[in-house]
Image: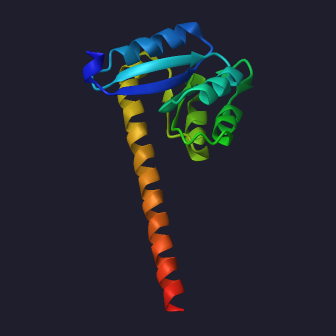
């Protein structure tokens, strides 16, 4: 039952209804968590949804009517939401997935039938990595602040 599982609120930015249905079906079968999925079919609509409600993760297709390729990732990253981005690529765009991760996406997944089976686990793994990275950054910043305070007291 969904009430017994934590909820992950995902914004699915996908213009293909068929792909969106497959993704939502895959996420509905997740045993560990309940995925609450909201869909936007354009980048502009995604920005409006991100401003209107809180999400835990963005699932981002790279081929949208109003944006394509790495520019799509760069645009979402520029919004500075602090959310992990899971890029969903077509088979012909697999090399772009690795470039998207280099830009700052948490991970990518090639859209094919066997990938949909592991999508929930990949999203949870991306959320864990994202949280760990932010915790480490906060810890590093706290450590740096403490060192600076000690230096300033000594001088």
Figure check: 44 above or below 152: above
Displayed quadrant of residue 117: top left
The residue lying at 38 percent from left, 37 percent from top is 125
Instruction: Give x and y (percent) for residue 63.
Output: 66, 22
Residue 25, x across and y down, in percent: 41, 11
Q: Is residue 62 visible?
A: no
> In this view, which residue lies farthest toward the right?
66
* 136 and 153: which is toward the camera: 153
Q: Is residue 76 above or below residue 155?
A: above
Figure check: 134 above or below 57: below
Q: Residue furthest bottom?
A: 155
Above or below — where is 53 with respect to 22?
Answer: below
Residue 116 screen position, x and y as percent? 41, 19
Q: Where is residue 129 in the image (x, y as percent from the top left)?
A: 41, 45
The residue depicted at 68 percent of the width and 24 percent of the height is: 43
> How many numbered tags mark residues here?
0
Q: In this view, does 154 lie to the left or right of 99?
A: left
Which residue is the extreme one toward the front?
A: 153
- How has the structure been colored for display? rainbow
Is residue 107 visible in the rendered image? The answer is: yes
Residue found 53% across the figure and 12% down from its top: 19
Q: In which quarter of the image is the N terminus?
A: top left
Relative to 75, 127 lies left or right: left
Q: In this view, does 73 lie to the left or right of 118?
A: right
Question: Is 38 in front, or is 53?
Answer: 53
Q: In which quarter of the image is the C terminus?
A: bottom right
């Amino acid at each position: 039952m969904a009430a017994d599982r934590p909820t992950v609120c995902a914004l699915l930015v996908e213009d293909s209804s068929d792909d969106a249905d497959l993704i939502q079906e895959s996420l509905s079968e997740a045993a560990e968590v309940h995925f609450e999925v909201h869909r936007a079919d354009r980048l502009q609509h995604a920005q409006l949804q991100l401003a209107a409600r809180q999400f835990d993760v963005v699932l981002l297709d790279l081929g949208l009517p109003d944006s394509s390729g790495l520019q799509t990732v760069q645009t979402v990253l520029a919004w500075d939401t602090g959310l992990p981005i899971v890029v969903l690529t077509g088979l012909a765009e697999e090399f772009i997935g690795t470039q998207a991760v280099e830009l700052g996406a948490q991970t990518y997944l090639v859209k094919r039938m066997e990938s949909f089976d592991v999508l929930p686990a990949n999203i949870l793994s991306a959320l864990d990595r994202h949280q760990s990275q932010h915790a480490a950054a906060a810890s590093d910043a706290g450590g740096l602040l403490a060192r600076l305070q000690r230096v300033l007291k000594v001088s």
